[in-house]
Image: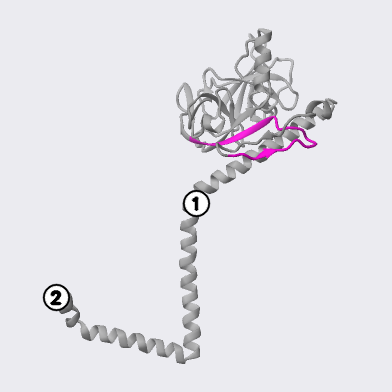
């Protein structure tokens, strides 16, 4: 403390100078209108810049929260879109709306472990497919059998066998779950087989990843009698009840006829960029248990979706 006082005493003249300088500047800006206006204009500019920087920093640290909120909202919107598409399909088939949806309770629209919002049964009927937003915690794309890990598990209603997709297309299928996490068998897996169809002519086939390229896959079992063109959209067929019908899988990028085969050799450019996965949706079909029970009773073994 004694050294501090000695130091202050040594620079007392400089401290008095700073004090007088400050008082002089204060009196100048208080007594002169021009200088006062210039001072406030400059101070407002710098204060504004500081507040803007503070806001940018704050927004940056809130990105995770904002992304989770957007993912939840997108999940709800996607459930509503699927609901409308299902109803349009039923209307086109002439299925009576009342016989399908009468006396059914409200269906929950989950967005996470604590989401308790429900979608009431209205003129569109109940929600069949619901979507759980999830964040990808790990992902592989270069192996023969690739997997993902998600930050949602049984607490969020996730179960093995559920489909996984993004806004751009199909990602894979849930393999195993714990309380807070889930693993997913990627579409980029040698044993994954997904039932699909060509959107233009409704031809049924199956997508398998056997190209060793994370951006492409092969479309199998399209007979030579069908007309296939580059750019044709490949979408889910809805068979098996894991994915809603009409979800984009990719687009045809090459078509070949081989003399010793009864089917086309087709390469499809996948719509999902598996190297940049961040957020995904786990699809829950509310009627899947009923379908599985019926298949078991009928002695039918369900194939890969």
For the record, the magenta segment spans 115-136
Report which residue position mark 1 lands on: 62
Q: Is residue 196 left or right of residue 2?
A: right
Tell me where residue 285 sits by quadrant. Answer: top right
Tell me where residue 218 sits by quadrant. Answer: top right
Q: Position of residue 272 (x, y in %)?
A: 57, 33
Report which residue position mark 2 lands on: 2
The crowding category of the residue bearing disc 2, from other C-alpha atoms within 10 Å (few below 14, some 14 to 19, many at least 20), is few
Q: Position of residue 55 (x, y in %)?
A: 49, 60
- Residue at 66% x, 7% y is 299
Residue 250 visible within the image: no
Tell me where residue 221 sits by quadrant. Answer: top right
Residue 78 visible within the image: yes
Query: If the image is split into quadrants, where does the N terminus sit?
Result: bottom left
Q: Was residue 220 drawn as part of the magenta stretch in this picture?
A: no
Q: Position of residue 233 (x, y in %)?
A: 68, 29
Q: Is residue 123 left or right of residue 160?
A: right
């Amino acid at each position: 403390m004694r050294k501090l006082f000695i130091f202050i005493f040594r620079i007392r003249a400089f401290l008095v100078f700073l004090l007088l300088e400050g008082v002089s500047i204060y009196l100048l800006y208080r007594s002169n209108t021009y200088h006062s206006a210039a001072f406030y204009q400059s101070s407002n500019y710098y204060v504004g810049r500081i507040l803007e920087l503070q806001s940018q920093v704050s927004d940056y640290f809130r990105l995770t929260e904002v992304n989770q909120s957007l993912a939840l909202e997108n999940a709800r919107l996607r459930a509503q879109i699927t609901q409308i598409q299902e109803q349009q399909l039923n209307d086109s088939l002439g299925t009576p709306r009342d016989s399908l949806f009468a006396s059914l309770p409200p269906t929950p629209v989950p967005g996470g472990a604590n989401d308790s919002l429900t979608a009431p049964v209205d003129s569109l009927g109940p929600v069949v497919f619901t979507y759980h937003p999830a964040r990808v915690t790990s992902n592989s794309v270069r192996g023969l059998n690739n997997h993902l890990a998600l930050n949602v598990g049984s607490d969020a209603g996730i179960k093995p066998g559920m489909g996984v997709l993004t806004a751009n297309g199909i990602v894979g299928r849930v393999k195993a779950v714990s309380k807070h996490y889930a693993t997913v068998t990627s579409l980029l897996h040698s044993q994954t087989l997904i039932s699909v169809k060509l959107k233009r002519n409704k031809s049924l086939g199956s997508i398998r990843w056997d190209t060793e390229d994370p951006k492409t896959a092969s479309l199998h079992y399209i007979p030579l009698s069908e007309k296939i063109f580059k750019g044709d959209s490949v979408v889910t067929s809805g068979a098996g009840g894991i994915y809603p019908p009409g979800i984009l899988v990719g687009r045809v990028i090459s078509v070949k006829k081989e003399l010793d085969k009864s089917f086309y050799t087709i390469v499809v450019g996948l719509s999902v960029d598996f190297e940049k996965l961040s957020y995904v949706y786990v699809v829950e079909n509310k009627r899947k248990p009923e379908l599985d029970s019926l298949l078991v009773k009928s002695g039918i073994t369900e194939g890969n979706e």
